[in-house]
Amino acid sequence: VTPGAGATAAEERAGVDLPTPAIRGAGALTGLDAAPDGRAPAAAPGAAGLIPVATPSLAGDRFRRATRECLLAVAAARAAIADAALPGNALVGPRTGILYVTATGYAPANRSFLEDESSTTLHFPYTSPSAVPGEVTIELGVRGPCVNLVGGGPAALQALWWAARWLDEGGVDRVLVLAVEVLQELRDLLGRARRLYAGPLVEGAACLLLERGGAGLLRWGGVQTGPPTAARDVTATLERVLAGRPPGLAWSGAGGGGRARVEARVLARAGAAPDRVARHGEALALGPLLALAAARRRGAAGPWLLTATWRTEYGALLWGADPARGPAPWSRPAGGR
Amino acid sequence: VGERGVTARGPGAVEPVAITGAGVVTPIGQDLDGFWTGLVTGVSGIGEIERFPVGDLRVTRGGEIKKLARDLPPAARAGAGAPRRLPACLTSRLLIQAAREALQSAGWWGRLPAPERLGVAIGTALGGIDDAARALAGAGGLAVLAGSAYDGPARNLARWLGARGPVLTVTTACASGATSLGLAADLLRAGQADVMLAGGADVLCRFVQRGFSVLRSLTRDAVRPFDRRRSGLLLGEGAALVVLERAPAGGRVPLGHLLGHSSTADGAHITAPDPEGRGLELAIRAALAQAGVGPPEVDLVSAHGTGTPANDVVETDVLKRVLGPRAYAVPVNSIKAHLGHTMGAAATLEAIMCLLAARHGQVPPTLNHGEPDPRCDLDYVPGRARPHRSRVSLSTSLGFGGCNAALVLAGGADPAR
């Protein structure tokens, strides 16, 4: 029996293609400037060092214990609500869901608790990654579906797919997709781990407030895990989501090395101009959210291609795909049982 | 019976996903047989912690795994790029040990699914925290540092398996081991993989023992879920994995099916459950709806049942609201007095317990439950295991950050009612 033979092509397409959500609001706090493509001079490929962001000051006694990552998260979520021109209590209740993604958002608190044995009850709860979306849900009264993923850009793409799925299923009216990365407290460790990422590193918080009603389909190419230079995976994933048509905008998070080169070749074959590939440095889980926020701000014609890499993973998603152009089928290797 | 060999259920129900195998590593048993025997005979894995210094901590006991398997292969499949040695990270080793048993029981060991169609979804509350402590102390190189991330254990497991499909690390705190199963089922239904290994793992370490100590959540007494004398939890460690598939091939009989899942936010408090249990109630109702199962059909509840004063009352109240009068007729157990609170592994272990209960026609007891609490007045299966034919089970979980999760499971080969 071929693996997965029980799933028909139509069922798989239904699972992979979903109605694209509408971006009702976007909030971002990063060291990147407000240039049209969100690119800062300091974020040129190959530049070294972190792009810093100031800690927001949030009023209220509740925040006296919260970590920097919590403050950034709440500020980004509030900014998304303000951008959507919604009242502050608009998300109260079970009809709003939240998906939180981070690669590093727990590490400073964990490190602090590990290294400082005088830490108290005020510190330990914040070592849990779930404290970050927890503070956001408390602040906004969100009581709907809640999922937290640890990973980089591919995990954020996966979260966008789940947000579209939740909205499509009808159980929620709005979804917050939130990412936070905090790096400054980890400079020395990151210096030891330079082989794991392509600099510069972008820290901050980004939040998209999504609703039903976007244009076209969200086409999810999935995440492939494998050797960083697996050209076959990159090519297959991109060809599957592009289905032979160039994207209106391509945001690459492919990082350095082989994957970026393969990606550029596939995009060129599809007719995408290389200068439409913007690079922001390594924004980890923030990357895809910043890309969508920037594309929306620019009013760029769709569909928007988002790609991301984190360690051995590569993922691609097409936001606002033409429903008339179906995706190429998922690869099904021969063999198995 | 539909084309997948499963009977259609209620309107709005999603496709059940088969659980074709399971594997566990726990303080009371390092395989399914040992785990089940320990549960039904009332074995407690709680004892003095020996692996790390605890002399200065308020509570020095926990559910520690004293001895690990030494016969694990460095990789589950041969080939270029296969790892040549096991990861040093203890959480990863527990996962690998559980994965071997899960694959064996599912019939996949020795002939693994194609790498691109095999995925991993791991829930954890601590990730590779033991590696983090070593990395901060300057020990180890890049591998130790990389493994110290929360997603380190899931990556290590995927590498050991040679899996190249989706690799997820889920961290809804102590509900992670339920959320990971629900997300893995979603990926299967969407065709993103054919086989998912899903579950959770965490290890006892000074970091978490000290953390819960300073929070004053740990008891110096026994863990007594739902008992009037309950005064807190004790921590444990372990790993639990299930093999999830849409369409088991070759006539294999699954252990059971995952019918429904939901994970929700409380939006109330970072560490304490919402006193009204609104998020938990929503999670249970949503999971039942996804399963196409009504409250009258639930015949076993595996509660989070930590033994803290707040948790057990909230869970009891929510179960009464959701199940109505039937709440008093359904056995509700907690296995945390056997194991301690195994954090990321807890919800998956409890889901596996539900399936084993259906298979064996028995419900494990809630240990140390002797004095009823007027506010916790359900049937908590005190004393000893009880013969009970269960088919549809509900498993509930709660975690830091106001995370809740609920799973609806059916034991046996047929998910139909």
Image (cartoon, rainbow, N blue to C red):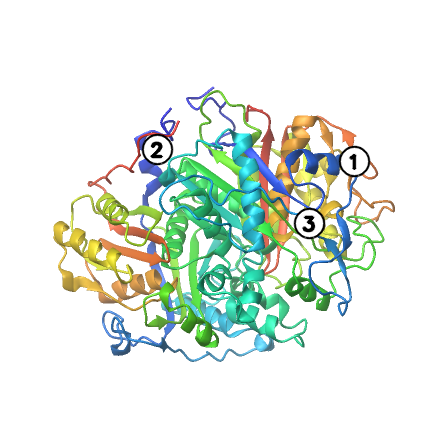
Residue type, mark 1 in image: Thr
Q: What element carries label 3?
A: loop
Of badges 1 and 2, the one in the foreground is: 1
Residue under mark 3: which chain is it in?
B
Asked where in the image residue A86 lies, by quadrant, the reply is bottom left
Of badges 1 and 3, the one in the foreground is: 3
Residue at 29% from the left image edge and 77% from the top image edge: A33
Q: Mark 3 points at which residue?
A: B65
Residue A11 shows which numbered tag?
2
Residue at 70% from the left image edge and 48% from the top image edge: B315
Q: Dot 1, how many residues are within 10 Å of its Cα: few (below 14), some (14-19), or many (20+)?
A: few
- Residue closer to the observer: A201 or A97: A201
In the rendered image, the vertical position of residue B120 relative to residue B384, given as above or below: below
Residue type, mark 2 in image: Glu
Residue type, mark 3 in image: Ile
Q: Name the residue under label 1.
A: B41
Q: Dot 3, how many residues are within 10 Å of its Cα: few (below 14), some (14-19), or many (20+)?
A: many
Q: What element carries label 2?
A: helix
Mark 1 / mark 3, whichever is N-terminal: 1
Asked if one can make out residue B259 in the rendered structure from this viewpoint, the answer is no
In the rendered image, the vertical position of residue B249 relative to residue A161, given as above or below: above
Of badges 3 and 2, the one in the foreground is: 3
* Residues marked 3 and 2 touching at CB (< 8 Å): no
Mark pair 3, 2: CA separation: 43 Å
Residue at 82% from the left image edge and 49% from the top image edge: B227
Residue A275: image x %, image y %?
15, 64
- Residue closer to the observer: B108 or B173: B108
Residue A231: image x %, image y %?
24, 49
